[in-house]
Amino acid sequence: MIPLRIKVEANADQPFVVRLRSFEAGACEQRTEELNPFDAALGRVGPEGADYVGQGGPIRILGIDPSKVDGDVLLVNPRRGTADRLIRSSSQHNTFLVTERCDQVCLMCSQPPKKHHVDLFPHFEAAALLAPEGATIGISGGEPTLFKARLFEFLGRVLDARPDLSFHVLTNGQHIEEDDRGAMSRIDQGRVVWGIPLYSCDPTVHDQIVGKEGAHAQLLKNLALMCRLGAQVELRTVLMRPNADGLPRLARFIASTVPFIQTWAIMQMENIGFGRMNWKTLFYDSSAGFDVVGRSIDLVRSRGIDAWLYNFPLCTVPEPYRHLAPATISDWKRAYREECDTCSLKAPCGGFFEWHPASHGYSNLGAIQ
Ligand code: SF4
């Protein structure tokens, strides 16, 4: 698995953001004009680590080849001797975890909520401004809009300063309200997609899945408001046993009640966090029961709404729907099985989450020749 946290040594009291420039040793002098104050250039590589130096002082990276972190933006925690790779320059899957707090307790949550919160927005802003040209940055949690004033301010400032960047914000959609009209209008909504989960058209089923009474009603109210505010919404539905049978009804509901959404993503489960705890009761074998998925996709697409399959191994999807199943599992947590080595679809296939169990649960799975 690609490491998101690496070991470092740095002489500083407080966490700081730095971008690594792994120019070949000796080439640094010629390239200094390309460096900005957050950059640290590679000076020397030895058995003890790779030494970088910048205006913020020296920093040593341990246990990873400098060529693999060239252009990466790190949040360095000198006291812990670690650095989080906030932006990996070679990746399309960079996400800032804004908070671990959440007001919902979803049955399959991959990142179970925690009470503790540290505001890292100043570091996220510094990191975003150093992102590669044209990057899309993910924002997730916990629930990022629990700190919506800070979030709006962050999005507005970064989007103003970097017209090439865009954001994908994962939110439960519970907290956007009429009073946010001013703040939302200051953000270029054309460059933000709001990924919002809706699990069922039945309020009881949705509320049980998210562990919050009244969540469904609040969400529908807020979806309409977000639409009026010009937000681009990607509705997300994790497919599970409690909502699988109702998927076609949800599809009809989406087409008739919230047709203003930009896309609908039907997603396979992730076996981690609460998802692992509840796997046996929740995992839905879509390779055996694809019918509800296929009918739902056909229905919304026939009404002109984009619908996609996220996190589905291609061999579990009938051939006519495979083009709707992009490789969505982030590169750092993507894995393949032994049988994938001989599969002709390995390149376009997103495979599995690294932590997907060996007894994978799909009754139809295997290399496609
Ligand atoms: S065998 Fe592996 S690579 Fe091929 S489609 Fe299935 S999961 Fe993807």
Image: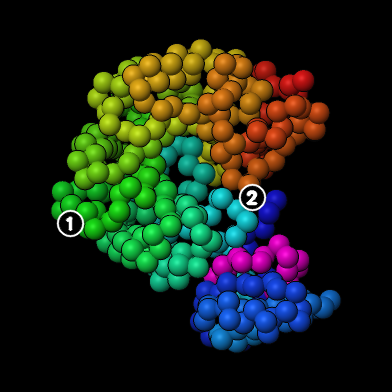
Is 208 in front, or is 189?
189
Q: Residues within 10 Å of mark 1 (few under 14, many from 20)?
A: few
Give the answer, above or below, for where 158 lies relative to 34.
above
Q: Is residue 209 visible?
A: no
Disc 1 is placed on an element classified as helix
* Amino acid carrying mark 2 in the image: Trp
Say which quarter of the image contains residue 201.
top left
Q: Residue furthest left?
A: 179
Res 127 label: none
Res 332 label: 2
At 64% from the left edge and 79% from the top edge, which residue is drawn? 31
State the image coordinates of residue 272 (x, y, percent, origin top left). 58, 42
Is 292 in front, or is 190?
190
At 30% from the left edge and 49% from the top edge, which residue is drawn? 189
* Number of numbered tags placed on the structure image: 2
At 57% from the left edge and 16% from the top edge, which residue is drawn? 320
Which of the two discs, 1 and 2, sits closer to the camera? 1
Q: Answer with mark 1 or mark 2, whichever residue precedes in sequence.
A: 1
Magenta extent: 59-77
Is 353 in front, or is 351?
351
Q: Within the magenta stretch, is there residue 28?
A: no
Q: Within the magenta stretch, is there residue 71?
A: yes
Q: Residue furthest right?
A: 47
Give the answer, above or below, for where 209 lies relative to 302.
below
Q: CA distance from mark 1 to mark 2?
A: 37 Å
Residue 203 relative to residue 168: left or right = left
Residue behind mark 1: 182
Q: Residues within 10 Å of mark 2 (few under 14, many from 20)?
A: some
* Amino acid carrying mark 1 in the image: Gly
State the image coordinates of residue 311 (x, y, percent, origin top left). 56, 34
At 65% from the left edge and 83% from the top edge, which residue is drawn? 53
Q: Is residue 330 visible?
A: yes
